[in-house]
Image (cartoon, rainbow, N blue to C red):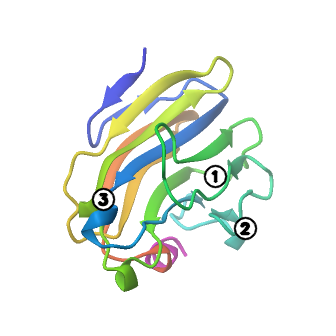
């Protein structure tokens, strides 16, 4: 049975291989333009910075150098039920310098399209154990991000040798470039 988390809650991840599923629904009629939300992962060291440019995982760089983090591809519409985008994590391959993996979702061309997360609903992040396809944790974002165009959904981090997940739900007015500035 999955644990439903609230913002700020943390839970141990007791699976060496798992999939991070991200989902959302958009309100196309509010802007007249379709939405393109993009999931990204920032693989971060002890200094709070990405280990290298190759450790920024997004639609144009789908795999970490050691293939410990793999983005399954960009979903341009977000149509349908379930996960809209997925990121696979294999902790057995992860570099020992990695201390955190931050999971962010941004709206592509949000400023030009006049879009924000206030027009996005039913957003969630979940972690599924790959060994048995069981959902371990789920966090449903319930905040109204009426001006934010990017949200850090959650983070996977290593504390004293134990990998954990923290439900974040932290919005930012900006895009991928702003997160790159934060983690570079």
Asked if residue 118 is positioned above or below residue 140 in the image, the reply reads below
The quarter of the picture where residue 86 lies is top right
Majority secondary structure of magenta residues: helix
User: Which residue, given by chain and number where applicable, does mark 1 sit on?
Assistant: 98
Q: Check if mark 3's residue and mark 1's residue have beta carbons within 8 Å.
A: no
Is residue 111 visible to us here?
yes
The verdict on residue 98 being magenta is no
Asked whether 116 or 180 is in front, the reply is 116
Asked if residue 78 is positioned above or below residue 135 in the image, the reply reads below
Which type of secondary structure does the marked residue at label 3 adopt?
Answer: loop
User: Which residue, given by chain and number where applicable, does mark 2 sit on?
Assistant: 54
Asked whether 39 or 15 is in front, the reply is 39
Q: Position of residue 1 (x, y in %)?
A: 43, 14
Between the residue at mark 1 and the residue at mark 2, the CA separation in whole angstroms equals 13 Å
Front disc: 3 or 1: 3
User: Which residue, given by chain and number where applicable, does mark 3 sit on?
Assistant: 27
- How crowded is the residue under tag 2: few (<14 C-alpha within 10 Å), some, or many (20+)? some
Sequence-wise, the earlier of marks 3 and 1 is 3
Front disc: 1 or 2: 2
Between the residue at mark 3 and the residue at mark 1, the CA separation in whole angstroms equals 37 Å
Sequence-wise, the earlier of marks 1 and 2 is 2
Which type of secondary structure does the marked residue at label 1 adopt?
Answer: loop
> Which span is picked out in magenta?
178-184
Name the residue located 51 percent from the left edge and 58 percent from the top edge: 77
Name the residue located 26 percent from the left edge and 36 percent from the top edge: 6
Q: Where is residue 36 in the image (x, y as percent from the top left)?
A: 48, 66
Residue placed farthest to the right in the image? 66
Asked if residue 114 is positioned above or below residue 127 in the image, the reply reads below
Between the residue at mark 2 and the residue at mark 3, the CA separation in whole angstroms equals 34 Å
Sequence-wise, the earlier of marks 2 and 3 is 3
Residue placed farthest to the top in the image? 1
């Amino acid at each position: 049975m999955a644990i439903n988390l609230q913002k700020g809650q943390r839970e141990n991840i007791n699976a060496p291989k798992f999939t991070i599923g991200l989902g959302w629904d958009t309100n196309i009629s509010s802007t007249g333009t379709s939405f393109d939300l993009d999931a990204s992962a920032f693989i971060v060291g002890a200094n709070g910075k990405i280990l290298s440019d190759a450790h920024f995982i997004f639609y144009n760089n789908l795999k970490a150098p050691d293939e410990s983090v793999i983005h399954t591809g960009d979903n341009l519409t977000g149509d349908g039920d379930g996960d809209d985008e997925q990121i696979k994590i294999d902790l057995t391959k992860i570099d020992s310098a990695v201390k955190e993996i931050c999971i962010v979702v941004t709206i592509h061309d949000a400023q030009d399209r006049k879009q924000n997360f206030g027009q996005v609903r039913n957003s969630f992040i979940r972690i599924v154990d790959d060994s048995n396809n069981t959902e371990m944790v789920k966090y449903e974002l319930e905040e109204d991000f009426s001006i934010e165009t990017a949200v850090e959904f959650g983070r996977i981090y290593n504390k004293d040798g134990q990998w954990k997940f923290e439900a974040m739900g932290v919005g930012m007015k900006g895009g991928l470039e702003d997160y790159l500035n934060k983690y570079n």
